[in-house]
Image: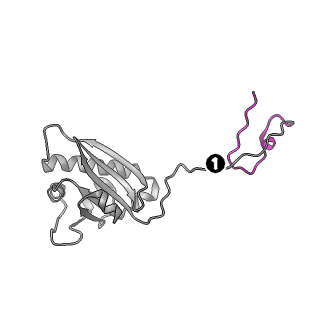
Amino acid sequence: MDLKFTFNGGSQASEHSHDSHAGASGGIPLPFSTVPSASSSVLELQVRLADESVIAEALSGDGVNYSSAQVERESGSGEEPIALGKAVRSALARAVAGLEGPLSEAVTALVLDLRGAEAEVLRSLGVAVDETADPRAVVDEALQRRIGVAAGTPIRFGDAHEASQA
């Protein structure tokens, strides 16, 4: 069996064939890309709790998931801010590591949905929280070094899924 493949759609199979008398037709361009495609300029890192784990996802404003990470929380730690903070930081770092190239620098906000523990978790990570400000917190230099998101990136609280729809 003689199989011939072409991926650019423009070349004839006979140009690349070792069998010069083969008259196979040119290839068809691949109809897909391996990179997700979004039309939004928003790229949020959204963090939420699920059972005994923390899930972080890099989502565009139109719902394209570029990266996700799930980290198991320490058993028996419950909602303890320090243990939860470690899991959140780890999930964020893993989700950012999953982004390719300049996408990690394109994150426009962190959105935390931690069942009301957002401020305590951020404080356990050393991030200043101002309940009266908008945003209530921003990524500082120490958190930037740990997770790879630019210092000054806003951190919002609330339901991560509703925030991406707004």
Residue at screen point 43% across, 58% down: 103
Residue at screen point 63% across, 48% down: 30
Q: How many labels does the image show?
A: 1
SS assignment for the magenta stretch, majority: loop
Q: Residue 77 in the image: state x and y as whole percent.
A: 13, 41
Magenta stretch: residue 144 in it? no
Residue at the right extreme?
A: 21
Name the quadrant containing residue 158: bottom left
Q: Mark 1 points at which residue?
A: 30
Quarter holding the C terminus?
bottom left
Residue at screen point 83% across, 36% down: 22
Q: Residue 39 in the image: state x and y as whole percent.
A: 48, 63
Q: Residue 73 in the image: state x and y as whole percent.
A: 21, 41
Q: Give the range drawn in magenta.
A: 1-20
Q: What element carries label 1?
A: loop
Q: In this view, does 24 lie above or below 119?
A: above
Name the quadrant containing residue 148: bottom left
